[in-house]
Image (cartoon, coloured by chain):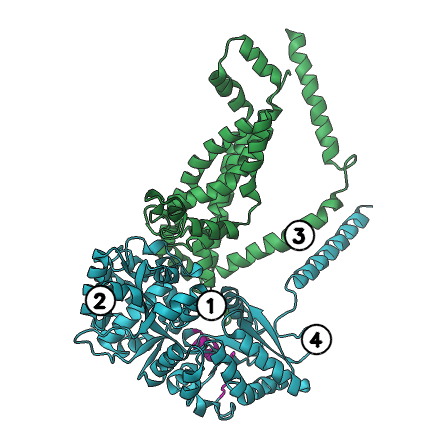
Amino acid sequence: MALSTDQPDIGTRTTAQRTNSSGSGRGGPSFLMAVPALAFFAAFALIPLGGVVVLSFMEWDGLSSPQWAGLAKWEQTLADPVTRHAMWLTFVFTAVSYVFQAPVALLLGVFMAGRQRYRAFLSVLYFLPLVFSAAAVGITFQSLLDPNFGLSRAFNSEFLGQNWLGDPDLALFVVVFVVAWCFVPLHSLLYQAGVRQIPESLYEAATIDGAGRLARFVNITLPQLRYTIITSSTLMLVGSLTYFDLIFVLTGGGPGGATRILPLDMYLTGFRSYDMGQASAIAVILVAVGLALGLALNRLSGASKMESQQAGL
Amino acid sequence: MNSTASRRSFLGFSGASALALGLAACEGGTQPGENPDGAGSANVWILTGGMWPVISDSVSRWNEAHPDQEISVEEFENDAYKERIRTAVGAGQAPTLVLSWGGGTLADYANNDQIIDLSGSTGDLEERLLPSVAQNGQVDGTTYAVPVNDVQPVVLFYNRDIFDEHGLEVPTTYEEMLSVSAELQDNDVLPFALAGASVWPELKWIQYLTDRIGGPEAFQAVLDGEPDAWSHPAFLEATTRIQELVETGAFGDNYASVAADQNADIALVHTGRAAMLLWLSSAYATFRSDAAEFTESALGWTQFPSVEGGAGDPANIVGNPANVFSVSSAASDEEQEAALGWISEQLYDDTQIEEMIAAGAVPPVQGIADQLAESENGDFLTFSYDLASEAPHFQLSWDQALPPGPAQELLTNLSQLFLMQITPEEFVDNMNATL
């Protein structure tokens, strides 16, 4: 009993020592190697971010010189019905996107992880949308969904001739679908890699114990994919929070503001209405929510104390 | 040891940031305002497509004749240009000749002293222009810009075959529009093609209806910033009629999915699915290139119908009087001189007018009726020219006439009005809030 408690202790100590020694830089690469990367990060991320925070307290139309406006722009932003609606839409868009993308990506990833040749071929097809440019996808879907000359005409189908992008109740879901079409491939790729990491012996043991296909999926695949799910979810949630280009091309925020999510609202406020102050305030909100969401996911999932899922194998 | 490390890291840091700055500078490529071939010569940004090659030709001819006053030309796609020019002007990096659409943006430039007063420095150009178009380059009565391309009034295009087939007459009043619309729908024809996804085509409707009902004064009061100017009864009536048209099915069920960028609205007319289309005269060129045979045999055009009891003159038109050029105040004296020289000597000279007419564009200058009539697209060009030269008032598109903020509010509210999401009263209240 005493022996068995001692042994893991020794193990922990040695790992702790090792982490310490590499942290002090004696064995690993010098801290200076990180300087270029940090400098780039400061120049292209931190300094502009600071600039945006300052601009959010200013009145600036892009032409005249910026005027200090105090909290006026923040009050205006928080009171603006369009921006408030955009906040709500962003929430709906993020949630619906996640609920739609996550299961599809997970199931596709698990399917793609199989070693059969036809699955490898299908994987290549599934992967294609990821390499298309968002602008091209937007224009293509706009044409395909055109009620008069799009898919409906090609297949002579009433159903396909719906007012896809013009119906305020439908447009957001169409956008969610098109965005998912673009991004599911990336996430299924993550899951495919994750599933392939799971040791075969776990499945063999489970099969011997009499577990069926579903039981193996629920009791082995899902728990083993825990960290992949966290990574993929973080990417999905923060990604849909800041998603812009495809929606801009596809609907431009319309019809009547039905797809004007926060990033789009920021762009239109800044570069169409030329109200840089309000646009910056929206940008700061986006940064704050994005950071909070990323941190919260990390905290909730315990990713900060990530540990191996395969101890003992 | 320690101090060397920190010193080295400091040097490394400054080196890296110098590199970063260098990269940032490279990224911008040629900075606007600087000439790639040498310092101090004038430049101009123009758009792609349409009749813009004519302008670039004209500048080349100028450059051949004046090698010491060369003007360099850069072409931009429409939206890319709009988003780039404002920041360039704001940063004092504008090209010598600043292209705009007149209206609110031009007034912003003028009020911030970003462009110079052109009064008296453009030769005899001003006397040759159509007055309704030349007006568009003025801010508070002072000329800050000159037109550069073609006049584009908004015209009601129609498919003659459809009207012949069903024995219908092209509507000349609002009441006739409603009855024709009903009869066309009975025959399974969409009365009006409308690209609602792009929103700006919807502007033509509210602009014409407001003008026919209340005359140009109603919107002028908005431009003048009079309190509650949108409460003018003409706006309420125009928006009510728009919703009447939507509800009676004049635009069909799915116009909000149709995008103008792909010319899907124009295609509806030449494929015989829709009978009429309210569009800028530039749609004629698209009809020609997309459906030459149809254009020849069955494309008709007319003015927007009148509204019974309306105060507006039915000869008034709306649209784009022309794009305009201003001269940047940030440019050097030599650059300004070259730009003004080109404007007064070559803008709308005989060669440019000939080339424009050949390209199917109508130059906004006086006394070219005969030349237009003899040209290949004579009928249509003469029609647009007469429309523009005889119009008592030529209203610039509202989204260009208003400052950018209110213009965006207008587009948002207008699309909601067409979608029946807001009532005419709400539209008026929302717009009054932007004044």
Q: Are marks 4 and 2 on the same chain?
A: yes
Horizontal and vertical percent position of residue B335: 62, 83
Residue beneath label 2, please? B168
Q: Would residue A58 be visible to someone looking at this image?
A: no
Amino acid type of disc 1?
Answer: Asp
Residue B178 visible in the shown view = yes
Mark 4 or mark 2: name the one nearer the start of the chain: 4
Q: What is the CA distance from the residue labelled 1 to the residue labelled 3?
A: 29 Å
Marked residue chain, label 3: A
Report the quarter where the N terminus of chain A lies.
top right
Residue at which label 1 appears:
A61
The residue that appears at 54% across and 12% down in the rendered structure is A206
Position of the C terminus of chain A, as image quadrant, is: top right
Q: Element under label 1?
A: loop
Mark 3 or 4, closer to the camera:
4
Separation (CA) of disc 3 from disc 2: 69 Å
Disc 3 on helix, strand or loop?
helix
Q: Position of residue A65 (x, y in %)?
A: 51, 71
Q: According to the rendering, which colour does chain B have?
A: cyan
Where is residue A97, by image quadrant?
top left
Asked whether B240 falls inside the magenta stretch, the response is no
Q: Which residue is mark 3?
A: A40
Q: Residues within 10 Å of mark 2 (few under 14, many from 20)?
A: few
Output the chain of dot 4: B
C-alpha distance separating marks 1 and 4:
33 Å
Whether tag 1 and tag 4 are in contact, CB under 8 A, the answer is no
